[in-house]
Image (cartoon, grey):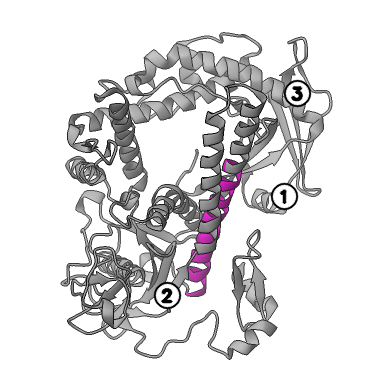
Amino acid sequence: MRHRHTQQPLSYDVRLPDGGQADALRVLEASRGVVNMLLTQLWPLLDEFGGEQRDPAWKQVVSLTASPDPHGDRQFRCEAETAGRILRAQAARNQVFVLIQPILTEGFIRPATEHQRAGKQRQSITTAIAALRTRLREDEDDETSVALLQNVVEQACNYFLTHGEFPATYEQMQAIPLLRVGLLTYAGDDGGAKGQAYRFALDLEHHTASLRFRFPDETGTWRWRTEPVVLTLPECVVTRLQEGGVLAPTLRELVKADGEPIAVLDVMLQVPKTPLAPWKDIERVLGFDWGVHTLITAVVLGTNSDTSSQPVQLSRPLFVRTSELEGHQARTRRQIDLLKAKQATSPADTPQWQLYEQEIGRCWQIYHARNHELAHLAVNLLLLFATVWECFLISGESLTTLKSTGRGKEVRGRWRNWRNTTTIRSEIWQILRYKCHLLGIRFRSERPKGTSHTWPRCGAVVQTYRSSRVEHRTDPVRWGRWLICAQCGYNADRDYCAALNLARLGIVRVLDRHTTGQRPPPRQEPDFTVTDSASVKPCRYMPHGAVLLFPPPTPRSRLLHEGKRYCNGWKKSCTLRSSYAADQMFRLCG
């Protein structure tokens, strides 16, 4: 993408009208065959696609092979672009495999016992990855690198659990990534007005777009559509198009739960990023923690004008609890397990087996849709909280804790850990990252070392307990939800304290930038931890009786008569209430 430091790509999927579905599905089916043949031919040359590539992917593919099914030069360029992007992504994983191959040992595998099957030693994996990153001197803020390293290591471990040995090459554990559904990017063509594979025109005044494309008819003859496909653009897409430019769209196939395929067009936009706030202007930091008993806990700290090294708490904590949704998701997972058990008793490819397969697909569709909506909802709440408090830096827990171990042995604990660690966190992190780019808010992840066992008021290392009740204060537990400090006597929720500590780390970064004036290179950047009392100072608890900006402290009886806003799609489970008037509250909520 051009000007990647000043532009942000966005995509909006629009379903094609029924009149264009058949033609679009035929072009997707034909292109899928060509892309899969290209992937099969070029898979032995995977190393050729590694490293930094500045030219479009189709140029590299065209230099290595010709079209296996000629039906237009520009059409083949688009198919080659699709295959080249897949191969470049796999080449990047191949390079990561070369890095992690020397550290693959049987210590990553937990042997099977009488009561437990073989699995992965996640603590050993995390330690080895951290040591590898230290040797490579990578930027600790590069969460994409962390996730990719861990993903490839776990893929190698999965291969070991199946075959009893680690793979010698990346191709040994990774099959050729053939497309199962149609996917075709038009980035290899000349554009909307002069394209030889597609034509795309916008009518922002009427909120529509017209698409013409080449497709094979029933006899296999390629030709142009005589009538364009007219798409109705949502209001948000029109607004974005007025801010930036349009990129080449992507045509792809979606398979519904009942097996019916539909064609959608990803309208690709490129909008300017909001300039990031200068470090010297940042005075408040929002810190958030991935909770054990809540999805997210957030709090706002600010720099103290009297003693610049000691932060001051400005807001009360924001807890994002999702217990009702977790119940729905757990019941959906149990339903999927029940359907799979019944499907296993039916002969394969029979009508009964197909019925179970369709129902399982519907359940997974609902399950993933809930998770996706929840991720967007959590991010929007964090950004709302940051906007209200005028925070231009969000400091969150690093994704290096994507896998947790030992946090709860009962059914509810296992379910909560699975939800927090494997499904929601990475999606929230990705959505929050790109939305911060759009809003001009800096987003930084911090290492969680000691954040959940350090008291933010005095900096002492404390133990966790089940609750604040007197009978529980004499029995510390490793992953308790309550922190009690024997040094200063204060106690609070564990996730709340972790959010405060992460915000403290953000304040230290801000003060360091105020002193240096700019961010140092990654290898020279100081590594702050909450256990370093010399640099990370304790925070003061609302010493001036701070008043919440949203909502203000007013009688609770007024809440029912003033602003009340339901979150889209969450009317029965999430509502924002305030004593502000409705129109004023709606402006605050964006």
Mark 3: amino acid = Asp
Disc 2 and disc 3: Cα gap in Å?
Answer: 53 Å
Q: Is residue 59 left or right of residue 507?
A: right
Residue 23's mark? Answer: 3
Mark 2: amino acid = Pro
Nearer-N-terminus badge (2/3): 3
Quarter of the image that includes the C terminus: bottom right
Residue 489's mark? Answer: none
Q: Quadrant of residue 25?
A: top right
Residue topped by disc 2: 317
* 198 or 386: nearer the viewer: 386
Q: Which residues are magenta?
A: 364-389
Query: Secondary structure of the magenta portion, mostly?
Result: helix
Residue topped by disc 1: 234
| Mark 2, secondary structure of its residue | loop
**Residue 51 appears in view:** no
Quick check: marks 2 and 3 in contact, CB under 8 Å?
no
Disc 1 and disc 2: Cα gap in Å?
Answer: 35 Å
Q: What x and y, as percent, mark residue 21? A: 75, 29
Above or below, 326 relative to 503: above
Magenta span includes 340: no
Q: Is residue 104 left or right of residue 467?
A: left
